[in-house]
Image (cartoon, rainbow, N blue to C red):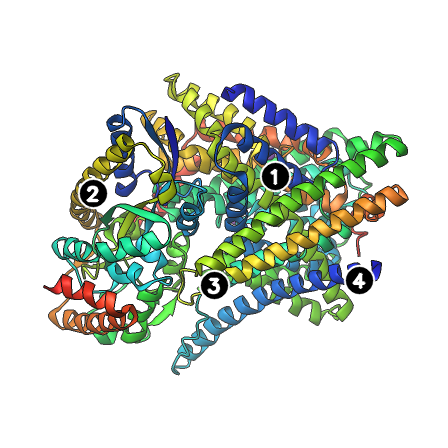
């Protein structure tokens, strides 16, 4: 069977299995099995066990359950409410008001978390309930959260940057610094979108809260102190050299417990509830990651991503065209593979092209992070959508639709960093070469 | 016609990977297309710690690993990383020749066949400050990642810290780690000059990678393909050792070009290292039994 | 039988939660040690140099065990996600058949996976595979925990398959549909 027929067949099969209500991890695994059975002589069982084991026993992944546990403990304190009460008076004048909490919260949390799913899960736990309670539009609050959760990958620390740097011999430090401005750019684009939407859809926004005196505002602001201390503590633990980016997640758990204790909400019931609930959420994500890991390895054996990348390399495209074609390629691939895997599976073929076309490899790393971010919010394989489905019960296709405007803004971000490469390159150049 | 998937741990820019790509091309040519190797670099198919097991269980037929990654399983896998036992290319090659029968024997027990083995550049110490004497090691936060580096830290009185390669930059910048022992290649790849100042050219040991094959898969090959594989392996080994030496020269120069202070350890420091090395070699000999003793005797002859 | 199974799922879930907490505690101790050392250095006292050897390997293995031991309990809790959009549009009688078919499919797939995870653990035991870090950990332990968790998931899928045949709907249907913002306890 040729590669195109096989790819289409597998795609149809994946949609059919997932559509019939089979659990996502099971569906991904089954498609991986079929791919191997049709194309590869190696028995699938050994590949399955190896890929699941190496994906599951992962130190980097330990940050995910830690952050989810932290979010779950905070969810049971008054912290979420406090945060919204503290911010509300300041955001009254800004179109979109508290909807900006998703974007701003994700951007700040991105400085702690290297993963998109962890950012989405933590901020979602804190913000979604409050936004709903206050009558904000669901489609917009879910869409912005799905989109801005991905900023976790752009602002350092970032798992995908580490993967890219290792695969291409680039400096992680440089790549981390290069991500800061594009990360803030994304946040600005997303906030701009919220403002435009809110201005155009005034009737779909909740009524404004009564205006408050400056003194009252200041009083409300005091309620922001605990959450600020928490964030400062987690980020501080990294920069003071007490914890690595992965270890900082556990610091977050302890700080959340202290916070919960000082506010008197640390009961056994709350604690065990948080532990069990976060264990289940982490398990749900880990199970899908295991299924996705097997599918990825199966794809590696079938050689489909490699063949597609080779096909593109055959065209000898100019720099601009190459970028357009690669973007389409990564967007399509990103629907079916998790973002990090698709980079791992294609760099060997893509990078020589990219180097030949004269791209700066740090710049290209930022571009890759952007396309991987897009992959997080495109169904059927998109981890932010999975996190949000588990939080809201909405299905991933509907969530993908909510996130579509943000997806388009990420494409705009690709255009912007292409037109102005210094958005990515200026900061590392200034910071590292001056010293 | 047979196609073999070949998982390797290092990225495309690495000289081992470049060598393997040439090896794969040689095999295909020499076997007139009867045996084709698809190289999956950078752990993209199977991650480094799982490659050996995957070869044993037939998940993949051929692959490359760092030998000392499996030092916990058998002393024979740890010999190349005993510090200051063989610290020049000449000695490392001699050690390899002395060790090869024992290595092949152990691999055969695991159902694996050794094709070839190539050394990395010699290991040196990257640090923020210059290390002048053994006293500077006391309490130094020293990166350890396997039993060998663990022993060095323990004997020298350094504080062992575990840092993943990807986390090194942050760890150095924030002071969680103060020194690491690795090859100049890693130093250049990770652009250590962004956050470090000193490279001590200690030439502590030359770790080796090996390319191994599943025995059943190897036996199933027609004789012509076996011959092609062995011929290409021989060429890859010679080429690889040469590439490694060039790598040492160019990478060390690159460190200098990027304003890293490349220092030769003082005689006092050298003597201290030799003492540590002698102790670890003795420990190794004890753990490796009669076979180990024979290997060391053959090497020292 | 019902009580035994439910207790088994719950016990496994708690074991998983303990693994997660163990990761938090181990990492917390390591970070705490570094903070203590920084304070000691500040006052000029001798640092402890406290270090948990092979922390990252241990944490990774605990996570693998945790992820799999929780599988059955997570299924029973209706937290494993799937696309129920089309199921929701089907009439109850048809949905029941599709649900049973889906569960039966899941039994087959998870049983296949369990078998090979078991083989993985068995091979590690047979080969005496050890981790590569400072503390050599036999890989059979975390891998056996994974296989055990996967086996329990097969039981849970089978359990739900029989429940759906009998009652027309999986036991977690209510929770699965009800997960809405902030309402899950
Ligand atoms: Na981040
Ligand atoms: Na996607």
* Disc on res. B237: 2
Separation (CA) of disc 4 from disc 2: 60 Å
- C172 vs A399, left or right, is right
Residue B129, horizontal then vertical, whole percent: 26, 65
Residue C16, horizontal then vertical, whole percent: 65, 61
**In this view, B260 is above or below A372:** below
The residue positioned 47% from the left and 66% from the top of the image is A242
Count residues near mark 4 (Cα–Cα under 10 Å), then give few for <14, some for 14-19, many for 20+. Answer: few
Q: Secondary structure at mark 4?
A: helix
Which is nearer the eye, B41 or A253? B41
Residue A379 found in image quarter: top right
* Disc on res. C4: 4
Count residues near mark 2 (Cα–Cα under 10 Å), then give few for <14, some for 14-19, many for 20+. Answer: many
Give the residue at mark 1: A29
Give the residue at mark 3: C138
Q: Secondary structure at mark 2?
A: helix
Ligand 2 visible in quadrant: top right
User: Mark 4 touching mark 2, by CB under 8 A?
Assistant: no
Q: Secondary structure at mark 3?
A: loop
Q: Residue furthest left?
A: B301
* Disc on res. A151: none
- Visible residue check, residue A130: no
- B97 vs A160, left or right, is left
- Nearer to us of marks 1 and 4 is 4
Separation (CA) of disc 1 from disc 4: 30 Å
- How many marks are shown on the rendered structure? 4
């Amino acid at each position: 069977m040729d590669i195109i027929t096989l790819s289409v067949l597998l795609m149809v099969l994946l949609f059919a299995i997932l559509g019939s209500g089979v659990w996502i991890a099971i569906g991904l695994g089954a498609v991986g099995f079929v791919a191997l059975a049709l194309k590869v002589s190696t028995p699938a069982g050994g590949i399955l066990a190896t890929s699941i084991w190496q994906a599951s026993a992962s130190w980097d992944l330990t940050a995910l359950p830690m952050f989810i546990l932290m979010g779950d403990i905070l969810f049971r304190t008054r912290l979420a409410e406090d945060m919204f009460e503290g911010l509300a008076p300041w955001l009254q004048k800004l179109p979109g008001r508290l909807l900006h909490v998703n974007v701003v919260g994700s951007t700040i949390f991105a400085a702690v978390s290297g993963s998109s799913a962890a950012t989405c899960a933590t901020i979602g736990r804190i913000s979604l309930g409050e936004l709903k309670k206050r009558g904000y539009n669901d489609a917009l609050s879910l869409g912005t959260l799905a989109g801005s959760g991905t900023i976790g990958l752009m602002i350092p620390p970032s798992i995908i940057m580490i993967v890219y740097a290792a695969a291409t011999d680039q400096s992680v430090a440089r790549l981390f610094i290069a991500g800061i401005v594009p990360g803030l750019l994304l946040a600005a684009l997303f906030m701009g979108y919220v403002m435009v939407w809110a201005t155009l859809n005034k009737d779909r926004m909740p009524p404004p809260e009564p205006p408050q005196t400056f003194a009252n505002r200041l009083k409300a602001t005091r309620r922001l102190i605990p959450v600020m201390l928490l964030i400062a503590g987690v980020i501080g633990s990294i920069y003071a050299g007490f914890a690595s980016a992965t270890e900082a997640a556990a610091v977050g758990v302890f700080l959340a417990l202290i916070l919960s204790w000082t506010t008197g909400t640390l009961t056994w019931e709350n604690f065990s509830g948080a532990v069990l609930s976060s264990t289940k959420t982490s398990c749900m994500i880990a199970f899908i990651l295991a299924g996705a890991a097997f599918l990825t390895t199966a794809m590696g054996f079938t050689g489909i991503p490699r063949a597609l990348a080779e096909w593109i390399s055959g065209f000898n495209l100019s720099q601009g065209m190459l970028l357009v074609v690669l973007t389409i390629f990564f967007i399509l691939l990103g629907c079916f593979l998790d973002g990090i895997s698709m980079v791992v599976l294609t760099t060997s073929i893509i990078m020589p092209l990219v180097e030949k076309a004269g791209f700066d490899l740090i710049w290209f790393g930022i571009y890759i992070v952007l396309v991987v971010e897009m992959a997080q919010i495109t169904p059927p394989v998109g981890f932010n959508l999975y996190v949000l489905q588990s939080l809201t019960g909405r299905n991933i296709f509907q969530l993908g639709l909510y996130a579509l405007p943000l997806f388009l803004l990420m494409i705009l971000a690709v255009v912007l960093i292409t037109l102005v490469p210094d958005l990515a390159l200026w900061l590392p150049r200034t910071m590292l070469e001056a010293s | 016609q047979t196609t073999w998937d070949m998982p390797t741990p290092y990225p495309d820019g690495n000289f081992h990977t470049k060598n393997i790509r040439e090896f794969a091309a040689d095999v295909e040519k020499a076997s007139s297309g009867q045996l084709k190797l698809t190289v999956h670099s950078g752990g993209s198919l199977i991650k480094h710690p799982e490659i050996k097991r995957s070869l044993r269980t037939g998940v993949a037929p051929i692959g490359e690993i760092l030998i000392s990654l499996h030092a916990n399983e058998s002393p024979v896998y740890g010999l190349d990383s005993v510090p200051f036992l063989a610290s020049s290319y000449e000695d490392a090659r001699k050690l390899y020749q002395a060790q090869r029968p024992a290595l092949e024997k152990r691999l055969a027990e695991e159902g694996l066949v050794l094709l070839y083995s190539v050394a990395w550049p010699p290991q040196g110490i990257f640090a923020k400050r210059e290390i002048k004497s053994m006293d500077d090691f006391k309490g130094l936060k020293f990166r350890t990642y396997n039993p060998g580096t663990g022993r060095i830290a323990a004997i020298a009185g350094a504080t062992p810290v575990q840092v993943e390669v990807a986390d090194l930059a942050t760890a150095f910048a924030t002071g969680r780690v103060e020194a690491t022992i690795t090859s100049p290649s890693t130093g250049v790849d990770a652009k250590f000059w962004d956050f470090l100042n000193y490279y001590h050219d200690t030439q502590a040991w030359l770790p080796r990678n090996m390319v191994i094959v599943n025995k059943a898969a190897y036996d199933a090959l027609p004789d012509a393909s076996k011959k092609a594989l062995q011929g290409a392996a021989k060429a890859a080994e010679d080429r690889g050792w040469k590439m490694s030496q060039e790598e040492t020269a160019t990478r060390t120069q690159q460190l200098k070009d990027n304003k890293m202070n490349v220092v030769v350890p003082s005689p006092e420091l050298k003597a201290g290292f030799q003492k540590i090395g002698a102790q670890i070699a003795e420990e190794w000999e004890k753990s490796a039994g009669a076979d180990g003793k024979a290997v060391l005797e053959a090497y020292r002859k | 039988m019902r009580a035994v199974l439910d207790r088994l799922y719950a016990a496994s879930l708690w074991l998983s939660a303990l693994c997660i907490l163990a990761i938090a505690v181990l990492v917390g101790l390591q970070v705490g040690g570094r903070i203590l050392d920084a304070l000691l250095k500040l006052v000029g006292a001798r640092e402890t140099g406290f270090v948990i050897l092979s922390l990252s390997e241990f944490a990774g293995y605990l996570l693998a065990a945790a992820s799999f031991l929780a599988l059955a309990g997570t299924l029973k809790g209706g937290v494993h996600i799937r696309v129920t959009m089309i199921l929701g549009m089907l009439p109850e009688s048809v949905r029941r058949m599709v649900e049973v078919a889906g569960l039966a499919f899941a039994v087959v797939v998870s049983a296949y996976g369990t078998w090979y995870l078991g083989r993985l653990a068995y091979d590690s035991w047979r080969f005496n595979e050890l981790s590569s870090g400072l503390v050599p950990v036999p890989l059979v332990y975390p891998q056996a925990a994974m296989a055990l968790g996967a086996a329990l998931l097969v039981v849970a899928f089978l359990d739900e398959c029989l429940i759906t045949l009998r009652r027309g709907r999986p036991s977690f249907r209510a929770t699965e549909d009800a997960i809405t913002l902030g309402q899950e306890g």
